[in-house]
Amino acid sequence: MKSALLAAVATSALLLAAPASAQGVKIGILNDQSGVYADYGGKWSVEAAKMAIEDFGGEVLGQKVELVTADHQNKPDLASSIARRWYDVENVDMITELTTSSVALAIHELSKEKKKIDIVVGAATSRLTGDACQPYGFHWAYDTRALAVGTGGALTKAGGDTWFFLTADYAFGYALEKDTSEIVTANGGKVVGSVRVPLNSSDFSSFLLQAQSSKAKIVGLANAGLDTTNSIKQASEFGIVSGGQKLAGLLMTLAEVNGLGLQAAQSLVLTEGYYWDLNDKTRNLGERFFKRTGRMPSMIHAGTYSATLSYLKAVKAAGTKDPDAVAKKLKELPVDDDFAQGGKVLENGRMVHDMYLFEVKKPSESKKPWDYYKLLARVPGDKAFFTAKESGCPLTK
C-alpha cells in the first residue's frame, strides 16, 4: 500500500512537471450564451470554432486541440474570474470571441498580465487596438471605427446630415457613438443629441421620444443584439420611420436581421465584415455552417472561425505555443480563409480586411432562405480601419 502511494505521488509529480506543450493546445470561447447577445454570438460562435479546429485537423505540433467554453453573462468581473482560472489552473492558451466591450477590455488587460493570447471577435470598441492595445491582444472581424466609416459615412454622404444617437450605456456604445460622430462631422454632418440606454432594456419609449423630438434625419442605434431588434420594433410603433426619420443600425448582423424578419428590417443600411453569399469562399463556409446549425453565420460566427484557424496556423508556423512567438507569427501571416481574403494583421493587433455596406432586401426581393442583403459598396480595409499609427496604440513606434 505504501509503495502504491509512493508510485501515485511520483506519477502526479511527473504530470505536474510535464511541459506545457505536452498538454496540447487549449482554446477558450468566452461569450454571452444566455443573454442579450446569445444569438449574436453565443453557441453559434462555439460551433464556428469547432469547425475551424476540425478543418485544421484537430491537432497542432502533434498535440490535440481542445476547446472549452463559458458564459460570461456580460459581466466583466465574472469574465475575469473565469479567464484567470482558465489561464492559471486549466492551462488555456488562447481566449477568443469575447462579446461585450467591457468584458473584452478586462480580458485584454488580464491577458497582458498573464502573457496569453486573446483574439477579440464579438466586442466592438476600437480602443482594443488603440490606447488599450497590448502585445498579446488581437482584434478580428470589425470594430467601431469600421462600422462608423461604413454606415455613418454612407448615410451622411447620402443626405443624412443630422444625427441623434441611442447609445448602449457601456464602453461599446460610447466608442461607437464617438467614432460615428467623428465620421459624421468629417463628412459635413452634425450630431444634435444622444441618450444613453441601459444594457438589456425592455422599454425604449422614452429614449425614442427624445430621438423623435430631436427631428434628426438619422437615428443612430449605437447598440447591438436584442437591444437593436427591440429598439427597431418599438421605433416602428412610434412611427419614427413613417414620420420621415431613418434608422441606422450601427451594429447589426445577419442574426439580428433574421430575428426581425425582412418585413421589419427591410431597407435598413448596415455594415458587416462577412456575408455568406458574397463569393465562393464565403458560400463554402456558410453552407457548411448551415448544415451543422440550420442557420447561416454572421460576421461574428465567421470571424470566430477565422480567429481560431489563424491562431492554429500561427502556432504551427512558430513551432511552439510560446505566446511571444505566436503573436509574432499572427502579425506576419496573411489572413486568407473563408471569412477574409487578403487580410493582414497590423503592429497593434488589428486584423485589417475589407468591410461591406449592405441594404436589407424587401421581402419581394428575397429569392431563397437567408437571402437578406443587397451589396451597396465594398469598403477597402485600409479605409475602414485606423492605421497602427492613427490608432493611438503605444506599441506603435
Image: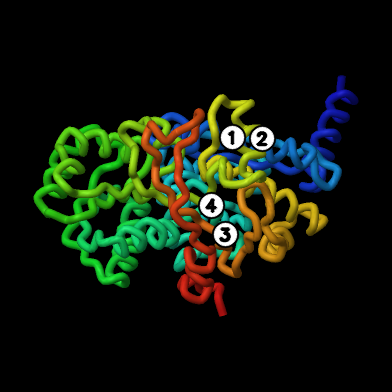
The answer to which of marks 2 and 3 sits earlier in the sequence is 2
* Residue marked by disc 3: 353
* Residue marked by disc 4: 141
Q: What count of labels does the image hold?
A: 4
Question: Is the Cβ of the residue at disc 2 closer than 8 Å to that at disc 3?
Answer: no
Question: Is the Cβ of the residue at disc 2 closer than 8 Å to that at disc 1?
Answer: yes
**What is the C-alpha distance between the residues marked 4 and 1?**
16 Å
**What is the C-alpha distance between the residues marked 3 and 1?**
23 Å
What residue is rendered at 48% in x and 42% in y? 79
Q: Quadrant of residue 374?
A: top left
The answer to which of marks 4 and 3 sits earlier in the sequence is 4
Q: Is residue 119 left or right of residue 200?
A: right
* Residue marked by disc 1: 46
The 10 Å Cα crowd at callout 3, few under 14, some 14 to 19, many 20 or more, is many
What residue is rendered at 21% in x and 36% in y? 236
SS for dot 3: loop
Q: In the rendered structure, which amino acid carries the disc numbered 1?
A: Val
